[in-house]
Amino acid sequence: MQHPENIAHQIEQKVRPFARADSHFHLDFSRFIPGFHGDEEAASRFAKHPAYQRSHRVFITPDNSLIPIRQSLLEEGRDIVLPTYGLHDGFIIISAATIPMGHERFASWLDGAQHFGRSVSLEELWQRGAFDLIVAGAAAVDRAGRRFGMGSHYLDIEWGIFAEAGLVNSETSVVAIVHDSQVSDQLVSASTSHVRADVVVTATQTLDIGIKSRPVALDWSLVEPELSNAPPLLELR
C-alpha cells in the first residue's frame, strides 16, 4: 500500500487535465471533488444499471462530478437527499415535484440544491423509509471499491449516522462515479469504518464489485470537533 500523501499527489496530477474548475475553489482539489469531461456519459451509463433503475430513496453526495446524475434523478421525478457543506446544516431533501419544469439542471448544482432543498431530520428520513441507493464521488477508487478522498471521512460519517438511525443496511448499494483515470489498482488500506463502493462507474466501464461488509454504527473517532454540533449528530445523540 502506498502512503496517502503520495497517492494524493498522483491523483492531483491525473485529475488536472480533465477536471472542470469549480466556481468557488477553482482547481484546489483539496477542497472538492471536481466534475470531469465525460461525467455525463458516466451518468448515462449508470442510469442503465439495475441499482439505479430500482432505486426509490436516494442519498447522493454534493460532488461536482455528480451533477449529471442528480439532474437525471430529478428529471425522472425522484427525490434526492444531500448533505450540506461540512454537515453544518445537516441534510437537505430536494423534492422533484417542487422544481419548475426545466430547472432540474440548476437544482442539481450546489447553489440550486440550497435554493430548492429544505432541511430534513433523521426522524423524517426514517419515516420516509431506508435508502436503497447511495451515490458518491471520489478522488480515486480501487478495484475493490475502496474510496480515497482528499479531506474528512464524510461518507463514512454519514453512513455511520444512517446506520444508527436505521436508514441503511447490508443491502444498500453504494455507487462511485469517477473518471477512468481515477480508478486505481491499489490504494491505502481501509479501516473497519470505511464504506466501500459495490459498483464503480466511469464513462467507459462499470465494475460490479459486490457488496462488502459495512459498518453497523458510527465511529465517533472520525467526528472532528467542528462537526460535533452538526444537527444530525446532535439528533443522533
Image: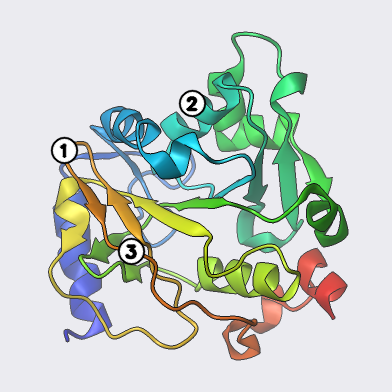
Reading the image, the residue beneath label 2 is 72
- Nearer to me, 146 or 62: 146
Picture quarter with the C terminus? bottom right
Reading the image, the residue beneath label 1 is 204
Which amino acid, mark 1? Thr
Q: CA distance from mark 1 to mark 3?
A: 19 Å
The image's colouring method is: rainbow
Element on which disc 1 rests: loop
Badge 3 local density, few (<14 within 10 Å), some, or many (20+)?
some
Estimate the x, y position of residue 100 in percent, counting from the top left. 71, 12
Estimate the x, y position of residue 80 in percent, counting from the top left. 64, 39
Q: Quadrant of residue 185?
A: bottom left
What residue sits 72% from the left and 76% below the top? Answer: 164
Residue 203, placed above or below residue 138: above
Estimate the x, y position of residue 155 in percent, counting from the top left. 52, 66
Residue 214, placed above or below residue 118: below
Residue 207 visible here: yes
- Mark sitting earlier along the chain (3/2): 2
Q: CA distance from mark 3 to mark 2?
A: 24 Å
What residue sits 54% from the left and 80% below the top? Answer: 215
Q: Which mark is residue 23?
A: none
Left/right placement of residue 25 relative to residue 182 reads right
Q: Which mark is residue 210?
A: 3
- Mark sitting earlier along the chain (2/1): 2
What residue sits 50% from the left and 83% below the top? Answer: 193
Estimate the x, y position of residue 192 in percent, counting from the top left. 45, 88
What residue sits 77% from the left and 21% below the top? Answer: 98
- Mark sitting earlier along the chain (1/3): 1
Q: Are marks 3 and 2 in contact (CB under 8 Å)?
A: no
Which amino acid, mark 2? Ser
